[in-house]
Amino acid sequence: MTRSLVSASRRALLGGALALAASLSLLAPAAAQTDFPSKPLRFIVPYPPGGPLDTMARLLAEKVRDSLGQPVIVENKAGAGGNIGADLVAKAAPDGYTLVMGAVATHAINPFLFANLPYDPIKDFAPITIVASVPNVLVMNVEFAQKNNIKDVADLVAYAKKNPGRLNYGSGGNGSAGHLSGELLKARAGISAEHIPYQGAAPAQLALLSGQSDFMFDNLAASAPLIKDGKVKALAVTTAKRSSLLPDVPTVEESGVKGFDLGTWFGVFAPGGTPAPVVAKLNKAYSDALNRPEVRERLLTMGSEQGPMSAEAFAAFVKAEKDKYQEIVKISGASLN
């Protein structure tokens, strides 16, 4: 065989080998998607243990494990208002094995509070499904409400206009949902009230009970027992619809303050670029878990009547929430750098 023929044969073999390797590399991701999951999943909670996101993440992890046949390991990665845990998942491999319980803060509020957010809340994530959407509730110190004959939001607005500079309200901190709700009320109702930020919602609630603050926007689940026991006065819920936990309490919008629809929500996200078949499998697993009676019951005790969404619907929801909070954060003037 001549040297030229040998060279041609070698080139042909090499070309065939390269073509085979290329075809196998194309088949590998598809096979990986078909076999998903083949190892345990990490479920990041970007807040400390014990809160509602952490509680729901652990409950869902048990149910999703049964559906997917793999352990779902919950890890708390708290800090920077949820940004540390969210960023960890944003930069993880887009294979569906690392998920985050994102929230209104990490995906709709923080982009406008932090000047140098390390991730893009839209591009860097693949939404899976919403988990819960919970109203906040406008509550007042009982003694203050009784003394000034404040029975509803209209009375509160009237008092504020007659007594400029007299009202104050507490929140869990600058940029928190309670802070933004307070500032939106001030803007929409045309009133003034001094904001008192505390180191978390629990201290803000204690300040309200003791009379250090006049009102606050609190998490519905946290305030419901106090409302029931008559320790705080409920004036309105912040969402567009009334809550089944407080059916007799009107919405802020119903009370005459137009353009008011805020709530606390959280949901499951994978890294951006996660393959569509993996997203679909995760959406089904989490949706099935959310539809279980024991999970639905737990969500109802939190004040959430939200069912699971398709990945596409959740993505549209997150985008709309981000657009909405851009205006609200601007109104509040809040900034965290």
Image (tube, rainbow, N blue to C red):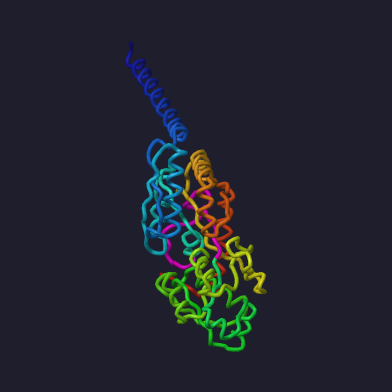
Q: Residue 300 vs residue 100: left or right? A: right
The reply to whether the magenta stretch includes residue 130 is yes
Q: Which residue is depicted at the point 39% across and 48% down?
A: 92
Count of marks placed on residues:
0
Of residues 142 and 312, the one drawn nearer to the viewer in this rendering: 142
The reply to whether the magenta stretch includes residue 225 is no
Residue that lies at the very extreme toward the top in this rendered image: 1
Quadrant for the N terminus, please.
Answer: top left
| Image coordinates for residue 221, horizontal then vertical, percent | 50, 63
Of residues 337 and 300, the one drawn nearer to the viewer in this rendering: 300
| Image coordinates for residue 9, horizontal then vertical, percent | 37, 17
Of residues 51 and 270, the one drawn nearer to the viewer in this rendering: 51
Q: Which residue is depicted at the point 55% across and 75% down?
A: 233
- Write the start and end of the magenta stretch as one range: 112-135
Q: Splitting the image into 4 quarters, where does residue 207 fall? A: bottom left
| Image coordinates for residue 152, horizontal then vertical, percent | 62, 77
| Image coordinates for residue 32, horizontal then vertical, percent | 43, 34
Quadrant for the C terminus, please.
Answer: bottom left
Question: Relative to residue 11, is residue 225 depicted above or below?
Answer: below
Question: Relative to residue 238, is residue 98 depicted above or below?
Answer: above
